[in-house]
Amino acid sequence: MLTGINEFGRLKRVAMRRPAEAFVGDAKIDAEWKDLNYHTRPEMAKAVAEHQHFADIIRSVGADILYLPPAKELTMDALYVRDAAAVCPKGVILANMGKKQRMGEPAIHGTFFAETQIPVIGAIQGEGRLEGGDLIWLDEKTVAIGRTYRTNDEGIRQFKALVGPDVHVEVAIMPHYKGQSDVFHLMSVISPLDKDLQLVYSPLMPIPFREWLLARGQKLVEVPDSEFASMGCNVLAIAPREVVMVKGNPETKARMEAAGCKVHVIDADAISVPGEGGPTCLTRPLERH
C-alpha cells in the first residue's frame, strides 16, 4: 500500500531520473533531440546542474528521492518520469505510452519498483494507452484522468478496473489543441497547490471538468495567457502551498503567492524548456504525508 495519494501533500518518496541516465551524453542528444520534437538541443552540463538544484529543493521538505536506472532502450524523454507510471493507494500502475519512442519505459520502472519493495499492482496493456501526466489524485478516493491523444478510452477502462469501484474517476475529455504529435496532458492545464487550491489555465480546460472542480469547493488560481506556453501551469507541489516552478512566469508566481503559496523558481533551460517537461513531468511522486 502507498499512503498520501494526492498531488499536494508534503513529499515523502519520489522517483526521478538523472540527466546522466536519460540524456547520457552529447552523442545521444545529437542523435535524438530533433526526432523527439524538442524545441532546442539541451546542453548536458547545464542539465546536470539544473536537475541537481531541483533535487535539492525537493529534499528540503524531507523527501527521499529514488533514482531510476539507465537502460539502453531509453530515450532522452526518460528524464520525464511522471508519464511511465501512475500510483493509487494499492500501489503502482505501469503506463502504456502513447508516444511510441517511450514504449520501453514502463517495464524498466516496474522492475525498479519491484526491486525497491514498492508494490506494482498491474499495467495498462494491449490497445490501452495511459500516461501519468493525465492523472491527478485529489484524495485517496477521487482521481481525475484526461482523455487525450496519450490516454485513450481503453486505457481509462483498465485503470478503473485496477483502482476498483471505491474510487471515483472523473474523466476530462481534453481538446485537440496542437494535435496528435504534441504532448498535451491533463496536467498541462492544472497543477494542484493544496487540497482546495488549483493552478489552472482555463482557456484549455473542459467546461464540465472545470465546473466539477468548482462544485467540489476548489479555488482556482488562473495562469495568464502570456505564461501558458512558458510552462506557467506546470508547477509541482512539494508540500501544501509550497511549490516549484520554472523561471519566466512572474505573473503566475505573484498570483500563487497572493494565494498563500511559497514558490521556488528553478532554472530549467536544459531540463524543461527543450522537451516541454516542467517540474511535474520530472518527478513521479510515490508517497506524500
Image (spheres, rainbow, N blue to C red):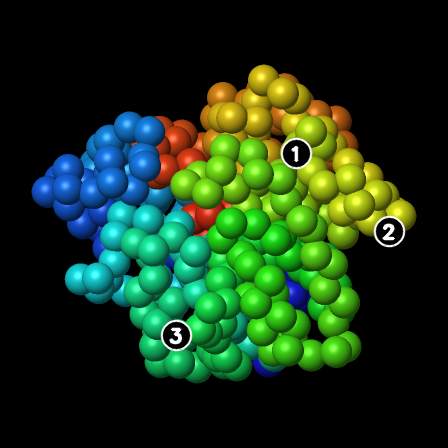
Q: Residue at x 55, y 76 (%)?
A: 91
What kind of element bears circle 2? loop
Which residue position holds label 3? Answer: 110
Extreme residue in the left direction: 27
Tag 1–tag 3 contact (CB < 8 Å) = no
Q: Earlier in the sequence, mark 1 or mark 2?
A: 1
Q: Residues within 10 Å of mark 3 (few under 14, many from 20)?
A: many
Question: Residue 191 appears at what percent x and percent y?
Answer: 63, 43
Question: Residue 160 appears at what percent x and percent y?
Answer: 65, 72
Q: Nearer the viewer, mark 1 or mark 3?
A: 1
133 over 165 or under it: above or below: above
Q: Earlier in the sequence, mark 1 or mark 3?
A: 3
State left or right for residue 168 relative to residue 189. Answer: right
Which residue position holds label 2? Answer: 216
Q: Residue at x 35, y 43 (%)?
A: 51
> The disc labelled 3 sits on which kind of residue?
Gly
Give me the C-alpha separation between circle 3 and circle 2.
Answer: 34 Å
Give me the C-alpha separation between circle 1 and circle 3.
Answer: 33 Å
Q: Quadrant of residue 167?
A: bottom right
> The disc labelled 1 sits on which kind of residue?
Leu
Q: Quadrant of the C terminus?
A: bottom right
Front one among 252 and 163: 163
Q: Quadrant of residue 151?
A: bottom right
> The disc labelled 2 sits on which kind of residue?
Arg
Q: Residues within 10 Å of mark 1 (few under 14, many from 20)?
A: some
What kind of element bears circle 3? helix
What kind of element bears circle 1? helix
Which residue position holds label 1? Answer: 204
Q: Nearer the viewer, mark 1 or mark 2?
A: 1
State left or right for residue 262 relative to residue 207. Answer: left
154 over 190 or under it: above or below: below
Front one among 218 and 130: 130
